[in-house]
Image (cartoon, helix red, strand yellow):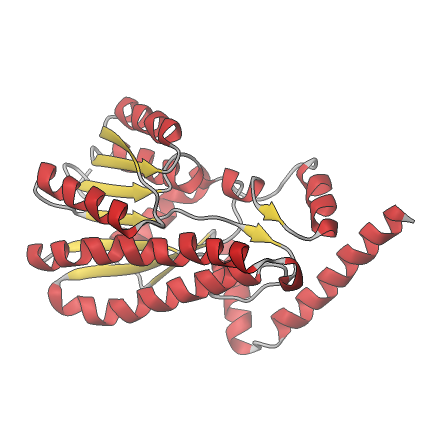
């Protein structure tokens, strides 16, 4: 149990998917898990599962785009428990489609959740951990924050910003005994992706057909063990599933290859959907 027994861990976006998987995993290691989400009912179900797993769960409603709410929540956890050992800034919001179809308001929403949500959680926890002389800030960004893709300009922009922010802070935090880790999962079968906002019409049609097929992507429960292993060992960047590592390596060697490949993929999707209409 060593890594988490009696430790206080905050997980944002914990109502489902990866956030719930992290919470339950920590619960099995006898942690005190504060499950937070804008969806209180989902957070309460996560709390119940944490309790069943052997941990001590709490459920709180928090909107990560509101700095005041995030700060108040974190300070309240510190006041009640006397410390914060881990925070997983995990809340996310996915959006797919061409840039020309994304409104400024939609773009801002993606940035607010996926970037500012990470910054707000970090800003509130960081001084507490500096004072303690220990703690881990695990910012859940994405493989999309390491490798550019197509049809997700807002999402990838936010994730790139969150990854850059995390790695820059890591270099500052070491002197204070604080670990800062960028967790970069690839595509997982989670409700966030299933409920993604598809703004381009041909993507809506393609996604509906795709969702009706059996998927080959792993669930959050399948990868959470290796993810947590990377966090426990203070890896700068944790990529999971490992099958995605070659794509990251390839991008670093030949950065032009990924946009080229996505151009082909996008053209094929559009052609396929246009042929259905004809």
Quadrant in which residue 139 is drawn: bottom left
Quadrant in which residue 46 is drawn: top left
Q: In this view, does 108 lie above or below 172?
A: above
For image coordinates 19% across by 66% down, the residue present is 173
Left or right relative to 275: residue 186: left
Res 90 visible: yes
Res 245 visible: no
Query: What percent of the width, then of the height, locates residue 36?
Result: 31, 38
For image coordinates 21% across by 60% down, the residue present is 179
For image coordinates 56% across by 63% down, the residue present is 153
Quadrant in which residue 261 is drawn: bottom right
Q: In this view, does 143 lie above or below 1?
A: below
Q: In this view, does 259 lie above or below 32?
A: below
86 or 59: which is nearer to us? Answer: 59
Query: What percent of the width, then of the height, locates residue 193?
Result: 55, 44
Left or right relative to 192: residue 259: right
Number of marks: 0
191 or 70: which is nearer to us? Answer: 70
Q: Is residue 223 above or below residue 40?
A: below
Query: What percent of the width, then of the height, locates residue 70?
Result: 26, 47
């Amino acid at each position: 149990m060593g890594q988490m027994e009696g430790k206080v861990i905050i997980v944002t976006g914990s109502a489902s998917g990866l956030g719930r998987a992290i919470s339950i995993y920590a619960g099995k290691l006898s942690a005190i898990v504060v499950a937070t989400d804008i969806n209180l009912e989902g957070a309460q179900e996560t709390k119940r599962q944490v309790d069943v797993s052997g941990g001590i769960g709490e459920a709180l409603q928090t909107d990560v785009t509101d700095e005041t709410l995030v700060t108040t929540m974190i300070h309240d956890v510190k006041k009640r428990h006397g410390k914060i050992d881990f925070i997983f800034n995990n809340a996310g919001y996915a959006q797919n489609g061409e840039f020309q179809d994304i409104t400024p308001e939609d773009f801002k929403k993606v940035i607010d959740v996926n970037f500012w949500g990470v910054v707000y959680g970090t800003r509130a926890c960081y001084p507490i951990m500096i004072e303690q002389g220990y703690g881990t800030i695990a910012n859940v960004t994405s493989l999309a924050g390491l490798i550019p893709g197509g049809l997700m300009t807002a999402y990838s922009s936010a994730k790139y910003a969150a990854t850059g922010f995390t790695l820059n802070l890591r270099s500052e935090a070491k002197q204070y005994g604080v670990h800062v880790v960028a967790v970069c999962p690839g595509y997982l079968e989670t409700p966030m992706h299933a409920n993604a906002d598809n703004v381009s019409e041909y993507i809506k049609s393609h996604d509906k057909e795709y969702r009706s097929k059996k998927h080959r992507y792993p669930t959050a429960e399948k990868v959470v063990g290796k993810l947590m292993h990377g966090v426990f060992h203070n890896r700068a960047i944790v990529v999971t599933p490992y099958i995605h590592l070659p794509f990251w390596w390839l991008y670093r060697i030949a950065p032009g290859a990924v946009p080229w490949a996505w151009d082909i993929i996008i053209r094929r999707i559009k052609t396929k959907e246009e042929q259905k209409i004809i």
